[in-house]
Amino acid sequence: MSQKLITKLTPEQKVLIPVYREKWQKIALYTQPINRQKAAEAIQFAYSLMGDPNPEIVFSDSPQAAFDILLDKIWQRWESKDDYGHRHIFKDRWELLINELEMQVAHELFTEIDRKMGEGSLQPGQLWSHILYSQIEEEWQDIVSEISIKLLCLWSYPIPTELWSSYVASVDFCISVLNCNYNSDDWQVLESIVKHCGWIYPLRNLCIICDRPRKLLLDDEYRLHAVEKPAIEFSDGYSLYAYHGVRLPEAYGKLNPQEWQPEWLLTTKNAELRRVLIEEIGYEKICQDLQTIEIDNWQEYTLFRIDDDADIEPIFILKMICPSTGNIHTLRVPPNVNSAKEAVEWINWGVDPEDFSIQT
């Protein structure tokens, strides 16, 4: 019997949204070792639904170890001319389940539920899996050829279960709270994978299952973050340093931000990392340690340019000395200002400083 389209939530249903969000966020942030038997059963069931029963299941202690296994497996198949193509075995099941639920829940409402389930969650660009994968890929640049890297990206990008947790939370809500009809096999597969697996590399006849991290440190916005220690670490010692969601080289991550050096800006190519360094080091120290050129001065203001390749565009700094306290303040201004007075005008939203009755 068909179910009437759900277009509105009752107050009682609305208050349950954060309950399901928190339930699956907690699962997404597990750092306990996976239960390998349950993980294997979940993968075997998924492959069986796709007509590919009894895949070879290989476990790894970290994503880097999984990448090592994957590379070895792919080269073995490459040499034997056998196809080891990437299988979207879970995408098909996911789309079937979503389509089934959307037939019962208005699209706008389903979108709203999904958005609320994701509030305060990791966003795609902030996911520790996204950050970690980019580090692993960079490390492999020195080991395998460019062609191999492209093949690996095409075949082996893993399923990050922490991202899937927010999707599964929405489905769980629709099934458990809204009493939507659903395919029990599809739901069992998706629920079990998120609950019992870490990263997954699904290929034809083979699935590599990575264990969860043993340490996972996040800031208030659920971004990877730690000071003077790794933000994420796996049982085999593989780790990653990050500062408010921005990946740090190990040499930087081991130090307190107060010890970070302005000269690092001259060799840092990553724009996000450069931004974090500038924010934490501060323009005053940057001006002190890097070569600066005085461009102009006006009253208690001096305009400087850092004459180094420290950022994507030239760094222009306005230095201000408080007349009453003697305290020095620095602020970055656009590189197209030509004088200290013009920089002061820019800071004050275009008001000519000559018009100020009292300058602050």
Image: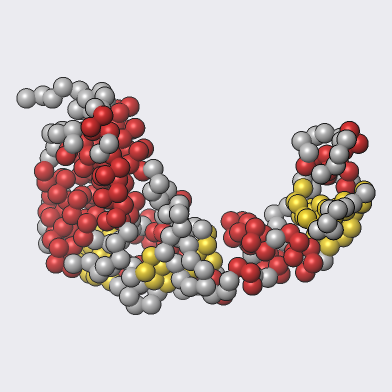
Does 43 sit left or right of 20 as displayed? left
Identify which residue, 250 or 17, lies in the foreground.
17
Instruction: Please provide percent x and percent y for residue 264.
Output: 67, 69
Please identify the residue farthest to the left as the structure is shown. Answer: 1
- When asked about the image quadrant of residue 317, the answer is bottom right
339 relative position to 125: left or right? right
Which residue appears at 16% of the width and 45% of the height?
A: 187
Say above or below: 277 vs 358. Answer: below
Residue extending farthest to the front is: 324
Which residue lies at the image location 14% right of the left edge and 67% below the top edge? 37
Q: 88 or 231, which lies in front?
A: 231
Q: Is residue 201 above or below residue 358?
A: below
**Residue 179 is at least partly visible in this image:** yes
Image side of residue 214 versus residue 56, left or right: right
Counting from the top left corner in percent of width and height, residue 61 is at 30, 73
- The spot of residue 203 in percent (x, y) is 25, 59
Residue at 27% of width from left, 36% of height from top?
A: 15
How many marks do you count on the picture? Answer: 0
Give the residue at x 18% y 36%. 177
**Quadrant including the C terminus:** top right
Q: Decide which of 21, 337 is in the foreground and name it.
A: 21
